[in-house]
Image (tube, rainbow, N blue to C red):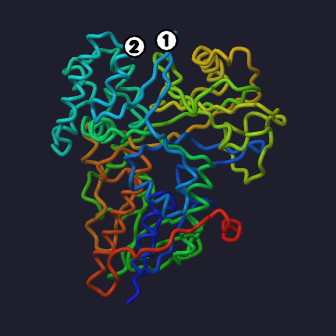
Amino acid sequence: MTVRVAVVGGGLAGITAALRCADAGHSVQLFESRPWLGGLTSSFTRGGLWVDNGQHVFLRCCEHYLALLRRLGMRDAVHLQPRLDIAVSGGGRTGRLSRSPLPAPLHLGWSLLRYPWLSPAARMRFTWAALALRAVDTTDPRTDTTSFGAWLRAHGQHRDAIDSLWDLVGIATLNARADDVSLALAATVFQIGLLTDSDAADIGWSRIPLRQLHGDAGLVALSDAGVRVSMRTKVTGIRPCGTAWTVGTAPGDVAADAVICAVPHTAAQALLPAAAVDLPPNWAAALGSSPIVNIHVVYDRRVLHEPMRAGVGTEVQWIFDRTAAAGLTSGQQPAGHTASPADALHTAPPAPMPAGAQYVAVSVSAADAFVDTPTAELRQRFLPAVEQMLPAARDARVLDFFVTRERHATFRPAPGSARLRPPAHTTMPGLALAGAWTSTGWPATMEGAVRSGENAAAEIISQFSEEGSRTGASDRAEIPDPRSRISEVIR
């Protein structure tokens, strides 16, 4: 018997789940409401410039995400630092966070000794707290209900250390400040990323637009795996039908033996049968969401001389060089599909960019204070802040300025949030959940999304394995260069 699996949602979780189920021999159909795949990792064009909806980075420890990139044939389309190295600026001081070849946690010792925002006493207290954090039991329910900020203060961390180190890493990975984060999630991030393997926190990023990295390459890989992809198809409901399932869509109902729901948690609650998850009635609203705002600036010259820089004591949390990935390497502007957010439409497209122009993006996580701020006001606040961080920007001319906002970028990782994150399995046979908001043990990252897709696929494959489906994924050859087939598949 061929098992018919419907995957609802074409983000990283949905792509992963669909590929796993197809590799296991199931007949898979994926539904995505938008005209492209990739979910929250997407891109649009503005004046011929490729713009990612947000700056998405990963770490070397994100093994499942890296495996997905290899499955998509896109491993060479990302850059991964050979060794962690972050330039940091703020308050007229500069420093670096980098690692040595020593084992963790000693690998950060030399960098911390020269870190200008900490006194010698604060460095000692930081070391003591890091060793204590390494021993935190992230599986203890009490750990989840504890605030990370409260734990840090109880372990001798003053505001200078929290602002310049703990939140420097934590806000970017957790999308919340220490006081608003579950200790369990924060400890997971620091244990895996900084306190276990010395190379775990080496940072990686895409060399190309995210639409191409995930969406277009995902479409090619899904097509080659035999998955039917229905884009521009909004799912209106998921209903049990005897021992099978009905997926309601605008064109009509689709029958399936199993369904993987891989949409954001608020959409999932609206689609799922009420009895599918053992959670409070308002679980999706209680889990909540946290916004990310990105400030995009194109200068007429180079102002940032590293791939990225972090900020201390400034609203510019992180700033990234987006020039090459956007197609602005030599003053040439690429053609592409246009699907601009509303903010990007408020400003006229820029004039042709001169050779030597640089495009930078400021990423502001936990951006509740900025998500509703008008673009003109954000310009007044952030351009001076960028100039203070990057002195070369003071003499540069701004060629373009615009803002993108992800109001519901991630779930809110508050203390006690673990009880609101359901596992992949549900109370109803043949129905599984995927998404970074599910119970992966990880925060809402690309790694968490991929792991959730794997969990959901494993759940469905396991349920139907006794009925004759093949268990386990087959080894398929990697696609040599999926970009060569994108134009063939996207018609």
Give the CA distance from mark 2 to mark 1: 8 Å
Image point 52% across, 68% down: which residue? Answer: 478
Left or right: where 217 falls relative to 465:
right
Disc 1 crowd, CA 10 A, few/some/many (<14, 14-19, 20+): few
Viewer-proximal residue among 79 and 241: 79
Q: Is residue 283 left or right of residue 323?
A: left
- x, y percentage for residue 137? 17, 40
Q: Secondary structure at mark 1?
A: strand
Amino acid type shown at disc 1? Arg
Disc 2 is placed on an element classified as loop
Q: Quadrant of residue 153?
A: top left
What number of labels is visible? 2
**Residue holding disc 2:** 117
Q: Residue at x 39, y 39 (%)?
A: 201
Please name the amino acid that badge 2 sits on: Trp
Q: Is residue 445 above or below residue 422?
A: above
The reply to whether callout 2 and callout 1 are in contact (CB within 8 Å) is yes
- Residue 79's place in the image compared with 180, above or below, is below
Q: Measured from the top left, where is residue 240 in percent x and y?
A: 36, 75
Residue denoted by label 1: 93
Sequence-earlier tag: 2 or 1: 1
**Quadrant of the rendering where the N terminus is positioned:** bottom left
- Which of 450/69 is in front? 69
Whole-percent x and y of residue 136?
A: 18, 36
Q: What's the residue at 40%, 51% (across, down)?
A: 447
For this rendering, which residue is in front, 407 or 61? 61
Name, please, the residue furthest toward the front: 101
